[in-house]
Image (spheres, rainbow, N blue to C red):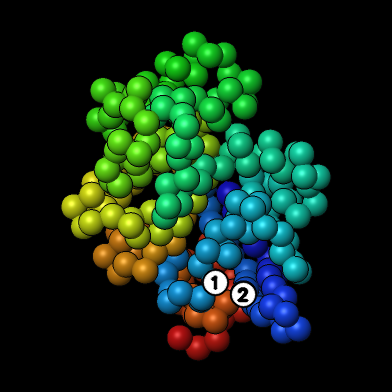
Amino acid sequence: MIHMENVSRNYLDGDREIQALANVSLNIPRGETVAVSGRSGSGKSTLLHLMGGLEGPSSGAVTVEGNRLNDMPDRALTAFRLRHIGFIFQFFHLIPTLTVLQNLMLPAELAGMTRAAGRSRALSLLEAVSLADRSQTMPDRLSGGEQQRVAVSRSLMLNPSVVLADEPTGNLDSESGARVLELLWEMTRSRGATLVIATHSAEVAGRAARRIEMRDGRIVRDTGSKSSSSGSGAGPA
């Protein structure tokens, strides 16, 4: 599903070049649940951004479902992300001027789904996360946990094959976070989606089938089998 080969990502900070990822190679099979852990600045978010085509590598190749993302034109890459990759972020990123239902329907409309089909799909997902009765509510009238449940639902609107979650419980209390995680695990598993979740939480990471630990832009630990990961460029753990 996801293949990264000798991937590095460098940034310029004034006259300094900062290496956020250093020669990372990684395979993630279809349907696998992976937690990426590490301290702030270890490269977790950069790794997810590269997997999702939000950023391009400075060197190396990123392939998702057989598509080499760094070779795709911008328009094709945008269309691929829309249909194949679901994103969930720490800060929800719901559109404040749209209702809960409209937030969910937006990606369906962008993908060319009919309004009736998009509405039906959105209401079904809201029902699954126990928010059908809040469909006409504006996001700022929801709690943080409710907003993140909406964001999880939105990420699944087009049945993506890959869901990338970057610290999805970072702004939630423990009870709301636990509920969001339970929904995220259940809803991705039932759809056969590959889930990659970046987290600081050892508890969250412990729930994943596979755990990757990062330090200084490198993979220093990977509980995956050799058949699913190779040549990570990791130093000693």
Residue 126 drawn at (x, y percent): 33, 27
Residue 201 drawn at (x, y percent): 32, 67
Q: Is residue 104 above or below residue 27?
A: above
Q: Is residue 181 left or right of residue 153?
A: left
Q: Please tell me which residue lies in front, 7 or 154.
A: 154
Point 33% across, 27% down: residue: 137
Q: Is residue 25 above or below residue 237?
A: above
Circle 2 residues within 10 Å: few <14, some 14–19, many ≥20: many
**Mark 2 belongs to which amino acid?**
Ala
Alpha carbon separation for disc pair 2 and 1: 6 Å
Q: Which residue is mark 1?
A: 43
Q: Is residue 30 left or right of residue 91?
A: right
> Which residue is the extreme one toward the top?
116
Circle 1 residues within 10 Å: few <14, some 14–19, many ≥20: many
**Mark 1 belongs to which amino acid?**
Gly
Point 46% across, 57% down: residue: 166
Can residue 220 be seen in this snapshot? yes
Q: Is residue 195 above or below residue 226?
A: above
Residue 53 drawn at (x, y percent): 65, 52
- Rendered image: mark on residue 20: 2
Q: Secondary structure at mark 1?
A: loop
Q: Please tell me which residue lies in front, 187 or 13.
A: 13
Point 33% across, 57% down: residue: 171
Q: Secondary structure at mark 2?
A: strand
> Which residue is the extreme one toward the bottom?
236
Residue 230 drawn at (x, y percent): 59, 70
